[in-house]
Image: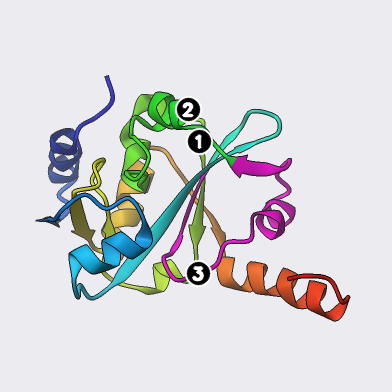
Amino acid sequence: MPATDLDLFARLDALSIAHRTIAHDAAHTVEEAQVLRGQLPGGHAKNLFLKDRKGGFWLVVAQEEVRVDLTALEKHLGAPRLSFASAQAMVEVLGVTPGSVTPFSLINESAKAVRLVLDEGLMGFDPLHFHPLRNDRTTVIGRDDFRRFLGAVGHAPVMVDVATVSAARAAAKATAGGPA
């Protein structure tokens, strides 16, 4: 059985990690979340659950305003052709449904093999805001506490400046005369 939000909160409490959760209507997109949550200071994420051509899974957690160029990211990571994972894979691997993808889903045993890509730009914020395994809540956690959580669930992130990687590819394409 995948973890619930209550399991997540119990794990955070067991790790002595302070957290606060705000209830709101369900948000399925970054735009919906921005309207529903109002003004909460700190970093807000977009979370992309991806699959590579060889069947590996990746969770990209980036600052919500950043454009993520999958081709640039796969080249930067040396990943074999990234694409969005199916809703079925999301449920089976992360234990969450579309619209609820979150780095907190790494608490699930089924997510052990998922490779985590964490945006350096997002990690410049404190606190951080993520869905707590459901998309009708936002959980606030300190940046250092978030890093402790990741360590406790066995996920060392690959740190990437997603904005710079994506912008570099767009600039190279523009210089070459191709579409960005």
Residue 12 coordinates in the image, percent (x, y): 18, 45
Amino acid bearing label 3: Val
Q: Earlier in the sequence, mark 3 or mark 2?
A: 3
Q: Which mark is residue 162?
A: none
Residue found 21% across the figure and 49% down from its top: 26
Left or right of 142 on screen, residue 44: right
Q: Which mark is residue 66?
A: 3
Q: Secondary structure at mark 1?
A: loop
Q: Which mark is residue 89?
A: 2
Which is more foreground, mark 1 or mark 2? 2
Frontmost residue, 156 versus 176: 176
Residue found 81% across the figure and 72% down from its top: 173
Which is more foreground, mark 3 or mark 1? 3
Q: Is residue 161 visible?
A: no
Amino acid bearing label 1: Val
**Which residue in the protein does label 1 denote?**
114
Q: Is residue 69 magenta?
A: yes
Q: Is residue 18 visible?
A: yes
Q: Earlier in the sequence, mark 1 or mark 2?
A: 2
Above or below, 109 relative to 168: above
Circle 2 residues within 10 Å: few <14, some 14–19, many ≥20: some
**Image color mode:** rainbow
